[in-house]
Amino acid sequence: MSKTPIALICVSSLFFAMPVFAGAAQSGHAPPFVTAETSSATTTSTAIPVAYQTTPGQTFSVYLTGYSFWDNTPPGSAAIARPVLRKSAGGTGTYNDPITIAVGHSFATGRQVLDFPPGTRFYFPALKRYAIVEDVCGDGPTPQFGPCHVGRNGMPWLDIYVDGRQAGQAAANSCMRRITGVHKVIVDPPNGFPVVKGALTESGCRT
């Protein structure tokens, strides 16, 4: 389960939809570097579980942060909440081996609702990586009030696994800071986009 980082700018052309509910089991990480208390994301006292409706190939902006082997929940692990292609966080960023990504979730209805369904693929042009939803971002009994579910400046908040197990915690932290910000993504993308293969931290965290 994932963790929450820094602040940024920009507003997205994302289209928000009415709630679409998908079940899930609890787990996940709390968000890195920027906490729910310090984030400028707007929360409400009556957060409603909303899953984003998208169409294959749709491009929109997201607020991206990262989590690593070192600050995962539990720390020093690659545990994930919603395995799809693997039992632990990983991936090299290719279409067939996308990197694990965590999304916001909610228990407001009494069951877990993910902002994007497990198995949803994204492509990040700036990172040249494919990613797949296999984890949730936000700990505790009310993750719907945390920044990952609330989003940032009208954009969904995604948290990508940067790994760092081999490179070390300092390198992983540096990578997380470097990638944090507004990114364009393509949801449910086709195969064939350019890829820089490798775990983000271990491959130099190029953006």
Image (spheres, grey):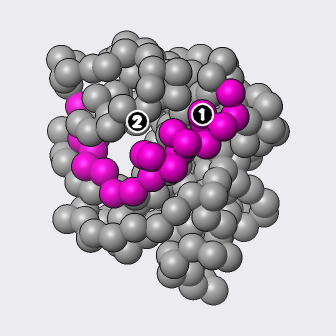
Q: Name the residue under label 2.
A: 120
Q: Give yes or no for residue 190 being in the magenta stretch.
A: no
* Label 2 neighbour load within 10 Å: few <14, some 14-19, many 20+: some
**Residue located at (66% from left, 18% from top):** 166
**Residue located at (52% from left, 21% from top):** 202
Q: Give yes or no for residue 170 being in the magenta stretch.
A: yes
Could you say which quadrant of the image residue 171 lies in? top right
- The picture places residue 56, in percent across and down from the top left corner, at 21, 38
Helix, strand or loop at label 2? It is loop
**Residue located at (43% from left, 32% from top):** 205
- The picture places residue 178, in percent across and down from the top left corner, at 45, 46
- The answer to whether 192 is drawn above or below residue 82 in the figure is above
- The picture places residue 99, in percent across and down from the top left corner, at 47, 26
Side of 71 where 65 appears, left or right:
left
Could you say which quadrant of the image residue 55 lies in? top left
Is the C terminus in the top left, top right, bottom left or bottom right quadrant?
A: top left
Which range of residues does the magenta coloring cover? 168-189
Could you say which quadrant of the image residue 113 lies in? bottom right
Find residue 171 and name its label. Answer: 1
Side of 71 where 207 appears, left or right:
left
Q: Which amino acid does label 1 sit on?
A: Ala
Spatial CA span between label 1 and label 2: 28 Å
Judged from this view, the residue extending furthest toward the bottom is: 45
Q: What residue type is labelled 2?
A: Thr
- The picture places residue 48, in percent across and down from the top left corner, at 54, 73
**Residue located at (61% from left, 64% from top):** 34
Helix, strand or loop at label 1? It is helix
Find residue 142 and name its label. Answer: none
- The answer to whether 31 is drawn above or below residue 77 in the figure is below
